[in-house]
Amino acid sequence: MFPFCTDPSALQGLAWLSCYLTTGSHMLFYASFGTVLALLAVTAPVALLFGFGGAMAARSRLAPLRWFGRIYTAMVRGVPDIIFFLFVPIALDQGFEWLRSRVYCDPSVPVRQGNEFIVCAAAKLPLSTSPEWVHQLYGIFLAVVAFSVVFGAFAANVLHGAMAAVPRAQLETAEAYGMSPRQVNRRILIPQMWTYALPGLANLWMILIKATPLLFVLGIEDIVYWARELGSAKTSAYAYRHPDWRLYYFLAILVFYLLMTWGSERIFDRLRARLSAGQATAAGEAMRKAAT
Amino acid sequence: MNQCLQTLQDYGLRAIGMGERLLPRSGFSLCEQMTLIGSGLIWNLYFGALAVFFGFFLANALAVAKASRNPLLRKPAEWFVFLFRGSPLFIQFFLAYEMLVQLPRAGIEVLGITVQTHWMTRAWAGALLVLVLNTAAYSAEIFHGALRNLPKGELEAADAYGMAGWTRYRRVVWPTAMRLAWPAYTNEAIFLFHATTLVFFSGFPAFQQRGDSLYYANYFADKTFNPFVAYPIVAGYFILLTLGLIALFGVVNRRLNRHLPGAAKKIRYRPNLVR
């Protein structure tokens, strides 16, 4: 990075550190923070969309659609989310490859042969001839889908609850005015439900932030991967020799997450104070006493 | 059937190191998968039950400290809760493992006695410690919320009876706070049991392939390239575990609300609204 970094073994102190922290692999480490933020930016709206679809489906008058919605919203209850993170990417990958194998390969050859899952070279996804970044991007794509499916189910739970919390009288009034079910949904139900959904969705955002290190379990080169890689003890075979520094790398990641959640926490505190004001509770009483 | 009984004998307690030493290498019958994943559930129960038990007491202390007006008590509690609620459990496991590894290998001298430390890096102790601290932080937030939302009238009634300090806390504040917090606390306990599946995917190694249920499910899915059997099995076990927990906590909930007829509503598991 810097001109004086050409010979790492001759460096001392701060100069060594400044060179060490700007090596190529450290740049990839910093870029992986971007991967996490990008995952958040992509997953949050997609999950919200999935959740909205799931909640609407759970209220549908069509029985099969309603069952689908109910199953989807009930999916995350009772089952740890990491099971879905392990299951969804590999199931999707095999699903895609099976579909492609029906088109590009000889359909008479079964894909499951004993304990193997084999498709011909033409059906591989991504193709074995494609460059490395395609493989990585495909992995991230599967991870995003897995996150969206799981958090979509969480969001469907929140939104379904919020829709049920909208006072029944509001909807009945709309029906009395002769609105069709579609109009009731669009004009009354959906605008009103956000007040009830907001606390749950804010909470969901916090859970989503804290679920991002699970990318590592999915085999993505994320911050946890690079922290382990860069932090492990480097012998003299490496240009920059150091003992086991993983502790410090994980501390840096911890600070990153604490900063991410700290901002959200402050907003919640403000909301909570607003909701406590004037309530006949211990907190409301304390606020009243503080004001007088 | 006999074969399955044999498998049950061989692998039923494999997760705690009893029975057959080698994991199945080929074949992978449904019975083997059910048995081994079920045996891994021992670890989930161990981590979850002990963490809930110890975490409960720590959480109560933390909640009171956090509600205290003395900043010397309040600030450390606030920082503790913020640290463990603000960061991912997954990172906490990694960090705790790296910290525990740094402990001197030979043990620490305390008053002439050498305290061994190497067992702290093993999952049964190290991961349990992290889970206790983590659940204590989350539960403390729930209990603190309940303390804030104590009905004003109950506190005034306690004052009118001349109760103060410890008596007031033990007879009025604590029972009411528990009653208010219990549905949310049930969700937290369920979430904690689910979080135990992370232990062997983080820094803590599975000693002699003694892992939890998800560790074995992942083993089978890797070996058979078939996620459609092992993962649904572990999911099924966890649904049963969740139902059991809801029943267990429901009994306590009914006891806490027994003086209020009709108040003990069925606890609904709402994962989204807790964390």
Image (cartoon, rainbow, N blue to C red):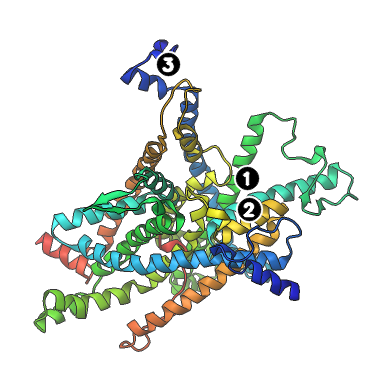
Check contact, mark 1 vs mark 2: CB within 8 A.
yes
- Residue under the point 13% across and 58% down: B70
| x, y percent for residue B136 | 33, 62
Mark 2 secondary-structure assignment: helix
Mark 1 secondary-structure assignment: helix
Q: Which sits earlier in the primary sequence, circle 2 or circle 3?
A: 3
Q: Residue tagged by mark 3?
A: A8
Res. A183 visible in picture: no
Subunit of label 2? A
List the single residue furthest toward the front: B112
Q: Residue tagged by mark 2?
A: A88
Q: Which sits earlier in the primary sequence, circle 1 or circle 2?
A: 2
Q: Is residue A278 left or right of residue A93?
A: left
Q: Residue tagged by mark 1?
A: A142
Query: Which amino acid, by three-letter code, is at mark 2?
Result: Val
Res. B19 visible in picture: yes
